[in-house]
Image (cartoon, helix red, strand yellow):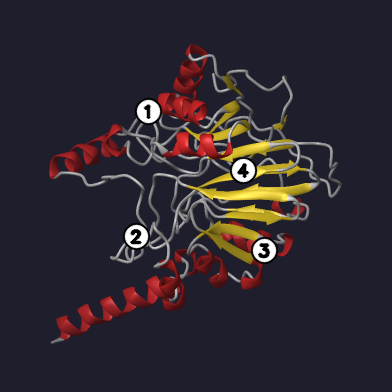
Amino acid sequence: MIALVIVVGFIGFGKLFMNYYPPFGRKVSKEKLSKFKQSENFSKKRKFINQIPTVMKFSPKDMAAMLVEFIKGNPNARPKKAIPMKKVEMSEENNEKQQKITWFGHSAFMVELDGKRLLLDPMFGSAPTPFPFFGLKRYSRGLPFKIGDLPLIDVVIISHDHYDHLDYGSIKKIIAKVKQFIVPLGVGSHLEKWGVDPAKIKELDWWEELEHEGLQLACTPARHFSGRSLTDRDATLWCSWVIKSEQTKIFFSGDSGYGPHFKTIGEKYGPFDLTLMECGQYNQRWAAIHMMPEETVQAHQDVKGKLMIPIHWGAFTLSLHAWTDPIDRVTKAGKQQNVAIATPKIGETISIGSDEYPSTMWWK
């Protein structure tokens, strides 16, 4: 009897913890679920789906092999010392004629277009986990700026709700500075729980477009998945983004395996002055949801990009490959395909449309 009470108690505590621990976010309401049924990307099982079959199931043999590899580890999985950063000087002034972008590591950027400031996937935390005090810290061991020095942000754009893209601590610190959050379907529920005014949140489905203060935004497909806990797999949508100002057009891939959606996006919205393309945290076992670096170059060509910045690397170890493997392979493939690739240091700013861009192999 005592054992039963203990088991029931643990189950009850677990449910309360999953429902109320803030970093897990909030489950989508029944009202929103009913609206999701109108989406072609929402299945009868009340889950979002990819456009093409995307299998992520592993056999017992695969699981055993991965466990051995993770335990063994890769001696080059992380840099031996903090990687270099370029300090970012924040200013409230914003020249409307300047079109520029600054990389903060992984998939986080500040974009300045036509006098507007945008943050893309602003993960500024120390580790991509709901328990950051336990996780392995970011390679740079810090940020190239103080979050408190951030100027007013016109728009925050989120690609999906995984911890390395949507960070509870970061959102809490920037809420007061952000005028508008634009996210894929369902992700707004997390933001609402964290204190964001629902009036400041706009949720879009794939292929939906939005005009916001002179900027044209389109929520476009990606081949991935979502979820922040054990019970919300694929409960929210994942996506890529098209960002267009009067002078500049950018494609932001979010997380995605390679697929035909890139060519479709290129045909509908390309060419792009700049693409931000995922190239890290891959493994052949989960190639359906994360591109290999050579596929990253092909995807850039598919969307008709001019200059590419490789993303989803340089901050955290989320796979088994060496930390420099993504950038080594993607630059090699880019050279073979005559693709222009910028390789900024964390905190380094690039002028969009300029023929001059950082291309040094600083990670060497």
Foreground mark, 2 or 1?
A: 2
Q: How far apart in space, not on screen, are marks 4 and 3 (Cα)?
A: 20 Å
Q: Residue furthest bottom?
A: 1
Q: How far apart in space, not on screen, are marks 1 and 4 (Cα)?
A: 22 Å
**Residue at screen point 19% across, 37% down:** 65
Q: Which residue is mark 3?
A: 175
Q: How far apart in space, not on screen, are marks 1 and 3 (Cα)?
A: 38 Å
Foreground mark, 2 or 3?
A: 2
Q: Is residue 135 left or right of residue 103?
A: left
Q: Which residue is mark 1?
A: 75
Q: Amino acid at mark 4?
A: Gly
Q: Is residue 358 left or right of residue 76?
A: right
* SS for dot 3: helix
Label 4 or label 2, whichever comes before in sequence order: 4
Label 4 or label 3, whichever comes before in sequence order: 4
Q: Amino acid at mark 1?
A: Pro
Q: How far apart in space, not on screen, are marks 2 and 1 (Cα)?
A: 32 Å
Provide residue 189's location: percent of width, then percent of height. Answer: 51, 69
The quadrant of the picture occupied by the N terminus is bottom left
Q: Is residue 242 left or right of residue 96?
A: left
Q: Which mark is residue 189?
A: none
